[in-house]
Amino acid sequence: AQSVAQPEDQVNVAEGNPLTVKCTYSVSGNPYLFWYVQYPNRGLQFLLKYITGDNLVKGSYGFEAEFNKSQTSFHLKKPSALVSDSALYFCAVRDGGTGGFKTIFGAGTRLFVKA
Amino acid sequence: DADVTQTPRNRITKTGKRIMLECSQTKGHDRMYWYRQDPGLGLRLIYYSFDVKDINKGEISDGYSVSRQAQAKFSLSLESAIPNQTALYFCATSDSQTGMNTEAFFGQGTRLTVV
């Protein structure tokens, strides 16, 4: 069965410093991986996705993520954090081996960026 | 106007009452989903629909029912609400025409409180 884990409930970082939000996954087939962001009182917004190809994926708002097949990870990164990046971040995985129709979400990681 | 619209945005209801949450979309997507979000648990899939005549149970369908009235409309019902159904509910859409790698688009959520 497919699953996704975000091992950190919360990540704290100072503005201007690099940030990493961790995600690991388990699927039977090829993984389709996504990151979403949720701001207060808003729905989830798509940030980026990995389907195939280059392991480093670039997305919205300067975020990027690195796919690591051997470690089954898809960590979200940004070189220089902004206070406005403070939000709840969700990693999600879709299992290509099962037809890829069901997306499983992680529990979410709250990012706090301090000025 | 939002592409995925949920009504109501907030609702307080009493235990045992029937309640319907509505979702409409203007994206022209064929796939629609209902999720609930609970702190520390992320998003869990309740029901999903791949077209008007297709309804499928998700991870946590007990106590819920859905209706796909048209391609653009997907409603979620709680036949007899109970307090542990207090949560934030999200409707989402995706487009099967672009394949399994397509991301989902979310509504702004409905905050439901059952007292």
Image (cartoon, coloured by chain):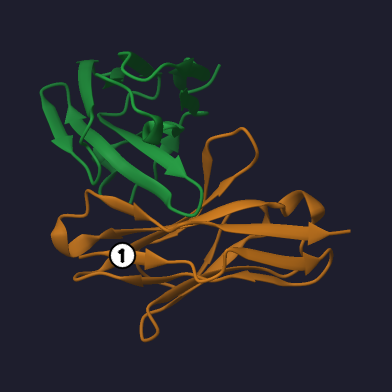
Label 1 sits on residue: A3
Residue B108: give x, y in percent of width and height.
52, 28
Q: In which quarter of the image is residue B6?
A: top left
Residue A44: give x, y in percent of width and height.
51, 41
Q: Tell me what residue is drawn at x 31 percent, y 28 percent.
A: B29
Residue B64 position (above or below residue B38) = above
- Give the chain coloured orange: A
Chain label for disc 1: A
Q: Tell me what residue is drawn at x 62 percent, y 33 percent.
A: A41
Q: How crowded is mark 1: few (under 14 residues within 10 Å), some or many (20 or more)?
A: some
Instruction: Say which colour chain B has.
Output: green
Spot the residue most to the left: B53
Left or right, B55 with reference to B28: left
**Which quarter of the image is occupied by the N terminus of chain B?**
top right
Q: Nearer the viewer, residue B90 or A97?
A: B90
Q: In which quarter of the image is residue A11?
A: bottom right
Residue A32: give x, y in percent of width and height.
33, 61
